Amino acid sequence: MKLNTTLALAAATATGLLSATSAYGFNLKTERSDLFNLFNERVNQERLWMEDSSAKMLELDPETLRWTGGVDPVDVFFINEGAGYRNQLFYSANGGTAEMIFADIASPESILKEANGPMKLGDGASLGTFAGDTSLDFRIKANGANNSNGKIYGADISANADGLQHVVAYEYFDKVAKENWVILGFEDLFGVHYNEGGSSDRDFNDVVIAVRGVTGDRVSVPEPSSTVAVLGLAALGMAGLRKSKKEL
Ligand SMILES: [Ca+2]
Ligand SMILES: [Ca+2]
């Protein structure tokens, strides 16, 4: 009997490094600074136009996020924010009612610091577990803490008021706790980039969260043949560059 208990505890320690304390109050920056720093490094520089993604982490289609069952809860951690707005974060499961996760995403520690912001970098909230395979949709209400009519932006592009992408998603597998993470970056400004006649900066760092325990589908990558074609074009471009330099 005693052996069984010991084994159970050992198993819990090995696999449940985080889930043992995954309820509200768990701070990722404090408890797993390695993961927090990795995710925080992925946060885009303020007002840097994100035209294409880096290959540092695998890019996901943010519309496909889901929890696939099991015993581990879904936990959401605030990584950073570079926003003048006081944004709010919501989620809905299987298209159901939107539930609030963070009511005022502002912090004295974030990229755009706000002294009276209530959040610490790394703060977490647990969504608990769901019944079976569950589709999860994360959305922000732009400046929702100050404006109850703030615009809602999420992964479904057709549901966004400007018909544009407002979420980027990346996947990371933590080998230490053997857990899957998805990092989401939201853009809170309406419309196209100011270089294209709009007033947005399209920096996708206005709310950045890391979600533990979910997965999603990878964004489709070009077929090998077209990859070769692209590489070929790049090589041509380089050759052209060298040639024109020589001519100078
Ligand atoms: Ca920003
Ligand atoms: Ca922005």
Image (spheres, rainbow, N blue to C red):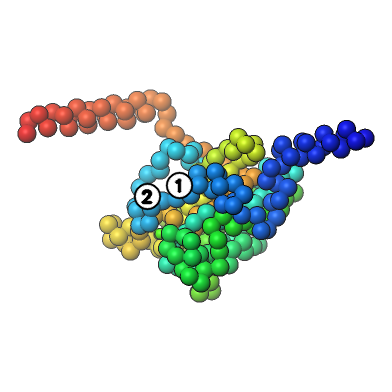
Residue 160 in the image, given as x and y percentages of width and height: 47, 59
Instruction: In the rendered view, tell whether residue 220 sits above or below residue 141.
Output: above
In which quarter of the view is residue 56 placed? top left
Q: Earlier in the sequence, mark 2 or mark 1?
A: 1
Q: Which mark is residue 143?
A: none
Residue 41's tag is: 1
Q: Nearer the viewer, residue 23 or 219?
A: 23
Report whether 243 appears left or right of 24: left
Does dot 1 land on a helix, a strand or a loop? helix
Q: Is residue 180 left or right of residue 57?
A: right
Q: Nearer the viewer, mark 2 or mark 1?
A: 1
Disc 2 element? loop
**What amino acid type should be assigned to the residue bearing mark 2?**
Met
* Picture layout, residue 65 above or below residue 98: above
Report whether the residue tagged 2 is closer than 8 Å to ligand 2: no
According to the picture, the residue beneath numbered tag 2 turns out to be: 50
Q: Is residue 199 above or below residue 21?
A: below
Is there CB contact under 8 Å for labels 2 and 1? no
